[in-house]
Amino acid sequence: MGLIKIVITEDHLKLAKQLIFSNLDGVIFAADEVGSPFGGDDRLTDIEIILDGVPEGGVDPFGDIPEMSDEKKERYEKLYADLPNVLEVILSLQTFETGHYKRRHHITRGGWVKYTPKVKA
């Protein structure tokens, strides 16, 4: 049986605290289909503002979305992709703590535990 592991960072927690959920016909979902799940029109721009503040030159709500480096896009997409597991950890352990977490792959709900990784000597 495999393990699912995640390292939850302060950036993950900042994003989790800013997620906006809606209830439409009894289905709860992050608002990604109609914009950003963080309230703006563009998910990556919202993540940049949440984590790094307003980009140089500001953001024109009626203009084009500012360009962003590939490295920054990859970092933000990885953090966003981690959010479902981050939310599972937060909800199942009822904690907003950074750290290393794992659960068995076959467990579909809960089962998350915080652990200290072994340091190779």
Image (cartoon, rainbow, N blue to C red):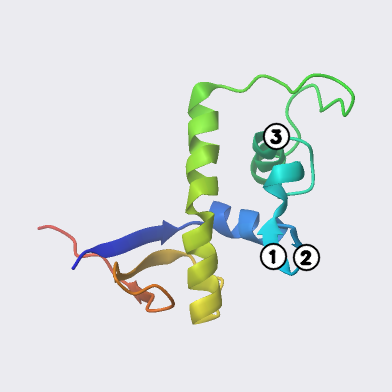
Q: Which of marks 1 and 2 is in front?
A: 2
31 relative to 109 in the view: left or right: right
* Residue 106 drawn at (x, y percent): 29, 71
How many marks can you see? 3
As rendered, which of 103 and 35 lies closer to the eye? 35
The residue beneath circle 3 is 45
Residues packed near mark 3 inside 10 Å, few (<14), some (14 to 19) or many (20 plus): many
Q: Quadrant of the N terminus?
A: bottom left
* Residue 37 drawn at (x, y percent): 71, 49
Q: In which quarter of the image is the C terminus?
A: bottom left
Q: Residue 97 carries which label?
A: none
Q: Which amino acid does label 3 sit on?
A: Thr
As rendered, which of 116 and 46 lies closer to the eye? 46
* Residue at image point 37% right, 74% down: 114
Where disc 2 sits, the SS reads: loop
Where disc 3 sits, the SS reads: helix
89 relative to 32 in the view: left or right: left
* Residue 87 drawn at (x, y percent): 55, 66
- Whether pointer 3 and pointer 1 mark residues with C-beta atoms closer than 8 Å, the reply is no
Q: Distance between the residues labelled 2 and 3?
A: 29 Å
